[in-house]
């Protein structure tokens, strides 16, 4: 009894920290998963919710177990959601079948994790921070613009497959119910930090959107049922044999993919691996500064990569060490890596107990969340490069990456970024 009491005293902070972090990470993970899969087709939203839950669970259990950073919470994150959504939208525009898009995103997640493991084992984790800022800025801004354009039709409640400019010019296609939910979500999410920083804006925004939906549903009976209701996620429907069969079938189909199809995803995987690694290491550095500790970047990246491989293998979303949930964990008493594991366990428990509530989350609210994410990804700092002739080339690099991302594709933007990184490096060496 004394041993149990002593263990509880030592790890009670980890329990409460992990529990609080889960309350932040789980809704955000579901939101990111839904926005990614809803970009494929509206009826895939439920699969997206499940992907978010599974990703949060796998990342929460595996990353802290093998990682080297205390208090770090890993879960599906905005960069992963943004890049995967943009890829999904591009594949849809090319006429690729929805099931094939899911397969390619699964393979993309696995390749991303493998690359992170390779980076960790090669001991080059510290070099990631040397990726030129203009390249990262241009890529993120391009992805942000793609996301905003892709989410506007869902935000306005327009029909699936509509393009943003078509929706913008035809107000008669809007559904005022979804539009009201989306606007309230965006306004609340943007204004929440001014009122409170104790609860992340994402959570406050989704809650406000859900309450708005409930208010409208009070006078609209059609919104009180899940059947044929395109305004909400809908039943997850992914338990027991159905889930096992779903994943088994997916792996059979992946086995039939051609090597050329897999090779075509490597450019995107390199970019996603770099972005997720930067996101993780940035969070680790902040934790080091606040706790006067020092993380092992290579060990952490290898652990994150393993977690992303497992998450993608079981149908979940990839992710990274996230700032918001990690800060909540720290402020709630988290002390060790056990807090991250507890967050992963609690994610599974809560998802099983509250799956019915997840089904009622409005899709327009999640679109609003991702639109805000897209806005925040657009980097305006490169405008200062125009103030000096010496940095005009850097601004040109940003514009080039953005333009390629918007008009050619993200894979081409990744290749452009790599080439321009080499050019910038050579310029610095010669200079």
Image (cartoon, helix red, strand yellow):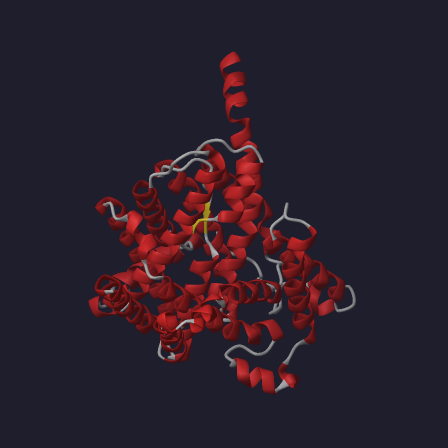
Residue 168 in the figure: left or right of residue 422: right
Q: Which residue lies at the image location 48% right of the left edge and 72% below the top edge?
A: 145
Q: Decide: is 91 above or below 187.
A: below
Q: Decide: is 404 above or below 203.
A: below
Q: Which residue lies at the image location 54% right of the left edge and 84% below the top edge?
A: 165
Q: Which residue lies at the image location 56% right of the left edge and 76% below the top edge?
A: 153
Q: Please name whichever residue, 286 or 110, is drawn nearer the observer in this view of the structure.
A: 286
Q: Decide: is 350 above or below 35.
A: above
Task: Give how far across and how far down residue 398 sits, in percent.
Answer: 39, 71
Residue 12 in the figure: left or right of residue 178: left
| Residue at the right extreme of this rendering | 219
Residue 269 in the figure: left or right of residue 367: left
Q: Which residue lies at the image location 44% right of the left edge and 54% below the top edge?
A: 242
Q: Decide: is 122 above or below 45.
A: above
Task: Give how far across and how far down residue 229 sits, in percent.
Answer: 62, 68
Does residue 44 appear in the picture of this structure? no
Does residue 252 appear in the picture of this structure? yes
Q: Please name whichever residue, 351 or 338, is drawn nearer the observer in this view of the structure.
A: 338
Task: Give how far across and how far down residue 240 sits, in percent.
Answer: 45, 49
Task: Give how far across and how far down residue 53 sits, in percent.
Answer: 49, 51
The quadrant holding residue 253 is bottom left
Placement of the C terminus among the 4 image quadrants: bottom left
The quadrant holding residue 390 is bottom left
Q: Please name whichever residue, 197 or 49, is drawn nearer the observer in this view of the structure.
A: 197
């Amino acid at each position: 009894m004394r041993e149990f009491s002593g263990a509880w005293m030592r790890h009670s902070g980890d329990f409460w920290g992990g529990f609080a972090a889960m309350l932040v990470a789980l809704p955000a993970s579901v939101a990111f998963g839904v926005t990614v899969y809803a970009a494929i087709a509206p009826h895939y939203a439920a699969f997206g919710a499940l992907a978010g839950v599974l990703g949060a669970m796998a990342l929460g259990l595996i990353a802290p177990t093998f990682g080297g950073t205390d208090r770090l919470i890993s879960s599906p994150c905005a960069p992963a959601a943004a890049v995967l959504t943009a890829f999904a939208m591009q594949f849809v525009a090319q006429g690729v079948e929805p099931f094939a898009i899911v397969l390619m995103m699964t393979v993309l997640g696995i390749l991303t994790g493998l690359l992170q493991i390779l980076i960790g084992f090669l001991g080059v984790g510290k070099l990631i921070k040397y990726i030129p800022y203009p390249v990262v800025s241009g890529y993120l801004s391009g992805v942000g613009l793609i996301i905003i354009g892709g989410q506007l039709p869902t935000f306005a409640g327009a029909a699936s497959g509509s393009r943003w400019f078509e929706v913008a010019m035809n107000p008669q296609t809007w559904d005022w119910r979804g539009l009201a939910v989306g606007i309230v979500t965006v306004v609340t999410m943007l204004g929440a930090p001014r009122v409170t920083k104790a609860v992340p804006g994402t959570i406050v925004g989704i809650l406000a959107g859900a309450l708005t939906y409930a208010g409208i549903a009070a006078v609209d009976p059609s919104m009180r049922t899940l059947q044929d209701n395109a305004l909400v996620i809908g039943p997850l429907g992914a338990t027991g044999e159905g889930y096992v069969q779903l994943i088994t079938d997916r792996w059979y189909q992946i086995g039939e993919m051609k090597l050329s199809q897999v090779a075509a995803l490597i450019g995107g995987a390199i970019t996603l691996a770099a972005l997720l690694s930067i996101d993780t290491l940035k969070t680790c550095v902040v934790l080091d500064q606040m706790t006067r500790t020092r993380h092992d970047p290579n060990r952490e990246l290898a652990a994150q990569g393993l977690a992303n491989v497992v998450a993608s293998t079981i149908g979940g979303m990839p992710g990274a060490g996230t700032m918001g949930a990690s800060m909540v964990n720290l402020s709630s008493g988290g002390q060790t890596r056990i807090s991250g594991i507890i967050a992963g366990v609690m994610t599974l428990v809560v998802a099983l107990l509250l799956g019915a509530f997840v089904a009622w989350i409005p899709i327009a609210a999640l679109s609003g969340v991702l639109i805000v994410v897209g806005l925040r990804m657009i980097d305006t700092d490169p405008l200062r490069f125009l103030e000096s002739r010496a940095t005009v080339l850097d601004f040109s690099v940003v514009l080039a990456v953005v333009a390629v991302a918007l008009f050619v594709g993200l894979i081409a933007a990744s290749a452009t970024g790599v080439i321009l990184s080499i050019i910038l490096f050579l310029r610095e060496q010669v200079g």
